Image: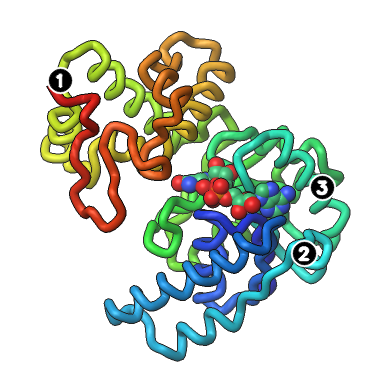
Amino acid sequence: MREIAVIGAGTMGNGIAHTFAQYGFAVSLVDVSSERLDKAIQTIGKNLDRQMAKGSITEEVKSKTLSSIKTYTEIPKGVAGAALVVEAATEDINLKLKIFKELDEAAPQGAILASNTSSISITRIAAVTKRPGQVIGMHFMNPVPVMKLVEIINGYATRPEVTQSIIDLAIQLDKTPCVVEDYPGFIANRILMPMINEAICSLHEGVAGVKEIDTVMKLGMAHPMGPLQLADFIGLDVCLSILKVLQEGFGQPKYAPNPLLVNMVTAGYLGVKSGEGFYHYTPGEKNPPVSPRFLP
Ligand SMILES: NC(=O)c1ccc[n+]([C@@H]2O[C@H](COP(=O)([O-])OP(=O)(O)OC[C@H]3O[C@@H](n4cnc5c(N)ncnc54)[C@H](O)[C@@H]3O)[C@@H](O)[C@H]2O)c1
């Protein structure tokens, strides 16, 4: 497997394209927006510079990586020679179903179609294609070039040899694959999101402040980042939509998103990307202060 197509050139798509290209694959990066493609190439260049400054790659690897990535604004052109397609477009079920129908028509018959979705059922995505045995979840973590885990999700119909090739591929990228089955939230978000929600419930009930909650989890549980800061980093809208998937998928009240989270998302306080969530963000600030709304 040498030719990979990545659909979506946002946060995850640029990281996935960067990682495959760095490990010697020819990558076609596809996005509907040519601005997003230009921005992705710039971001990859900056991230490669950072790796060079740390001494983890050479100038030669940087230029080979950049020259291995070609960009496209149309799926059929981008996936024509792909052995694997990794879809990392916006997290929207209808959009993903539409993209997978198009991928099924345009990608070579033997190609594996993978999705980087955080929460949408792989079985449901596979069902709109004529090759459900070749559809699988390949869930990278953010930032992709740095994070070691690839959560591999077997859809109901995924064939064992397809899972094995994705395991082998993740190892070739110097990642650690973990195979899980297709149930709401898979493993990563099924465990992470209730923890984040519980942190928000504790804040909402006045049990402790933002700093205290995050400090307990950082220093007490050796988490590199507290759950409220992590929620800001992921995006509060993303956290809310994953909790809704868990609530709907399991039908249990324990997954109900806390009303404070719902209010914050409704008001547009989405965390890092909007400039404010549980913390207040200014560009270049390394230690963001707690949002004034959550100060006593
Ligand atoms: N951000 C994270 O931390 C994270 C982590 C793991 C998984 N994910 C998953 O990765 C996927 C992408 O998330 P993201 O954060 O990179 O989103 P993003 O909003 O940064 O990027 C999505 C990109 O998809 C493009 N797009 C939309 N429709 C398209 C189409 N029809 N064809 C091609 N491109 C299209 C958009 O133009 C945009 O550039 C989602 O499924 C998300 O759940 C995100």
What is the three-letter code of the residue carrying label 3?
Answer: Arg
The residue at the point 75 percent across, 67 percent down is: 82
Q: Secondary structure at mark 3?
A: loop
Q: From the viewer's perspective, is 149 left or right of 83?
A: left
Residue bearing mark 3: 131
Quarter of the picture containing the N terminus is bottom right
The residue at the point 41 percent across, 56 percent down is: 143
The residue at the point 41 percent across, 70 percent down is: 47
Residue bearing mark 2: 79
205 is higher (above) or lower (below) than 57: above
Q: Is the Cβ of the residue at disc 1 closer than 8 Å to that at disc 3?
A: no
The quadrant where residue 8 appears: bottom right
274 is higher (above) or lower (below) than 173: above
Count of number-bearing discs: 3
Q: Is the Cβ of the residue at disc 2 closer than 8 Å to that at disc 3?
A: no
Residue 269 pos. (x, y %) = 39, 31
